[in-house]
Amino acid sequence: MSAVGELALWAALACAAWGIVAAGIALRRHDDRFSESAMRAGIACAVLLALADAGLTAMLLSADVRYAYAAATTSAVLPRAYRLAAFLSRPAGSLLGFAALTAVIAAISPRTVRERARVSLATCGLLALAIVAMLAIGSPFAPASVVASDGVGLDPAWHLPWTTIARLALLAFTSVLAIAKIRALGGVPWRRWVYAANALGFVAIVCARRRELAGPPWDTADWLLLAVWAVSVAFRRRERGRTARALEIAFGVAGVVALIGSALSLTEAFSLPDGAPVSARDPFGSAWTFVSDGRSIYTQLDRRVLAVFIETGHGRGARPEWRIYVDASGDARAQVPVDAVLAGAREYLALGLLAPPAAGSASVRVRWEPFFAFWWLAAALLVAAAVVRAREPGAP
């Protein structure tokens, strides 16, 4: 199946190139035959890219380490969910997912849109650019230079579900925004698509923010998303509609409250001896008590794990387990908190290990983020406003 995916990828590039040529001729000569050919080239790209997606998925699910992409992101002991998450864990996979999703959405649009030469030219041009970029950074179907008995496994950062959710939202955001621009270049109404793109972009940002609090910091893709989303929102045309406007005002209020909570965030680091309670105060002055029950060493998935069990005492209380992954040589690879505490809408607590726990103590980082739940509320309100605007009579 991987060989089929590689062949489908190159065939999609050829179809996209022909679509560009055919659409250009159609615009120059006003020839409907070339417009039809360019439209069919776009549809062929959608089918071929979907086939390439299936090939990469099959490679990852089978952990076929003969290929570099699978060898670098999977292993035989990983659950299927993690193998699927590996699809987006590298730039080549994300680009392939973006190209396939964009091509499929363009292919199922109304024929009155697809048959326009400008739409075909924009679609095929964008797909060709994405495929060339993917091949330039390294094809996901490239064979491994050395075939090992098993892969190295998924990066621990991707064991956090919010990492995958943020990347999926980013993928949907970029694809919807691309379709909006393609339709605009073809002279077709496109504002509904922009509404959806703005909502998806904000959801992706909130998911990335949630992941940052719980584990690894933002990467380049997250910052790029933030920049593109900010530009798309800044130049969005304001429309009429009392309900949508009321939702957007509420979204703004929730966003301001969430920003205030971020400004009030507090981080504290301290040593936590086994069995000895340590107290700390959150931004509101409430006392929290942390008690370490000691450490354990065990094997999980494809890595050795050092675990510290920490009880938190405040309000309802909780007992999260915080882990740090180590490789075969004993060096720390990533800090991954397994759980966190959400104390209603008031604040969010994130715990993390600053260093591998030594016998008898652990170095702990505690972070409070007041009003974090308002980020989720703002995301829900913006999505609702996008739906209302798209359903308004006469909305383009």
Image (cartoon, rainbow, N blue to C red):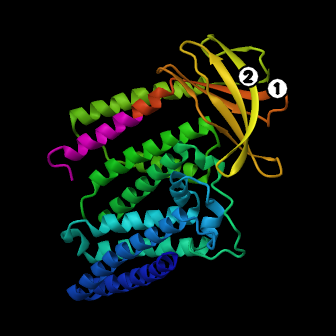
Judge from the rendering whether residue 70 lies leftward or rightward of residue 193; answer left or right: right
Give the residue pinned by disc 2. Answer: 292
For image coordinates 48% across by 65% down, the residue present is: 57
Q: Quadrant of residue 325?
A: top right
At label 1, counting other C-alpha atoms closer than 10 Å, the crowd grade (few under 14, some 14-19, many 20 or more) is some
How many angstroms separate mark 2 from mark 1 (CA)? 8 Å
Q: Any magenta on residue 382?
A: yes
Q: Give yes or no for contact between labels 2 and 1 (Cβ–Cβ under 8 Å).
A: yes
Q: Position of residue 235 (x, y in %)?
A: 39, 49
The amino acid type, in three-letter code, at marker 2 is Ser
Task: Check residue 281 in the rendering and tell me which mark sits there, or answer none.
Answer: none
The amino acid type, in three-letter code, at marker 1 is Ser
Q: Position of residue 216 (x, y in %)?
A: 65, 43
Comparing 83 with 264, the one in front is: 83
For image coordinates 23% across by 85% down, the residue present is: 30
Give the residue furthest to the left: 393
Q: Quadrant of residue 297?
A: top right
Q: Any magenta on residue 120?
A: no
Q: Is residue 285 above or below residue 360?
A: above
The reply to whether residue 186 is visible in this rendering is no
Judge from the rendering whether residue 230 lies leftward or rightward of residue 41; answer left or right: right
Give the residue pinned by disc 1. Answer: 361
SS at circle 1: strand
Magenta stretch, main secondary structure, is: helix
For image coordinates 24% across by 83% down, the residue present is: 36
Looking at the rendering, the stretch of residues picked out in magenta corresponds to 379-396
